[in-house]
Image (cartoon, rainbow, N blue to C red):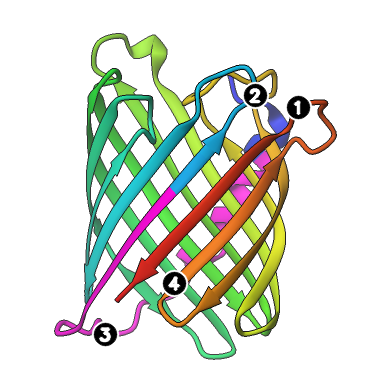
Amino acid sequence: MLRPAFVVLTLVLTAGPVLAQAPPPDQNAWSISASAYTFIVPDDRDVVQPTLAADRGWLHLAARYNYEDVETGSVWFGYNFGGGTTLEWTVTPMIGGVVGTTAGVAPGWTFSLSYWKLELASESEYVIDARNTSESFFYNWSELSISPVDWLRAGAVVQRTRVYQSDRDVQRGLFVGVTYKIVDVAAYVFNPDDSKPIVVLAASVGF
C-alpha cells in the first residue's frame, strides 16, 4: 500500500491543473524531444533510461526504455491539454503498453504548472502487471524548481520507482539544471543524507 504522505503529495501535485479548460490545440507544429537519464546506484548496476517523445497539437507519442523495469520498454499515446497566461499549465493523460522484464498496460499522465519563475512538473503511471497483478506498481517523478535566470533552474525532486533497489519507498532529493539553446543538462542527488546517495545525470534535446 502507498504511504499516506505519498498519497497526499500525489493528490496535491495532480489536483489543480485538471480543473481548468483546454485551449484549441495547434494541429500543425511538431515538437520532438529525446532524453537520457543515467542512474548511478551504489552497490548496484547503473541504469540508463532513454526516452523519445513527439507532440503535435493534442497528440502525444512517446517511447521509454528501462523506465518501468530494467530491460523493459514501453510505448505511449496521450492527449495534450494546456492553457493560462500568468499561470500556465499543461496536462497529458496517457495510456501505455509495457513489454520486457515487466509486461502489462499502464495508464499515466504528465503535467506542469508554471508561475513567475516557479515550475511544478510531474509524470506518473500505474503499471498493471499482466503476469502477476500483485506486482502492479505506481511510478512517479516530480520536480519543483525555481529559475532565477532563463538558463538555470534548481529545486527539489521526488520519485517512486523499482528500476533499482532502495530502502526508501519514496525517494527525495535536490537537483540543478542548465539549458543552452535546445540542450538541457541536469544533475540530481537522491537521499543526500544517506551514506551512499543515488546520483542521476540527465541530458535532453528538443526540436
Image disc number at residue 183: 4
Q: Which residue is mark 2?
A: 42
Structural distance between the alpha carbons of marks 4 and 2: 28 Å
Tell me the amino acid under the disc marked 1: Lys
Structural distance between the alpha carbons of marks 3 and 4: 28 Å
Image disc number at residue 50: none
* Residue pictured at 62% horizontal, 54% vertical: 187
Tell me the amino acid under the disc marked 2: Pro
Q: Relative to 134, is 140 above or below?
A: below
Range of residues picked out in magenta: 8-36
* Residue pictured at 43% horizontal, 70% vertical: 90
Q: Relative to 119, is 34 above or below?
A: above
* Residue pictured at 53% horizontal, 37% vertical: 39
In the image, 126 versus 47, the foreground residue is: 47
Task: Point out the tag, 1 or 3, that comes first from the N-terminus.
Answer: 3
Image disc number at residue 196: 1
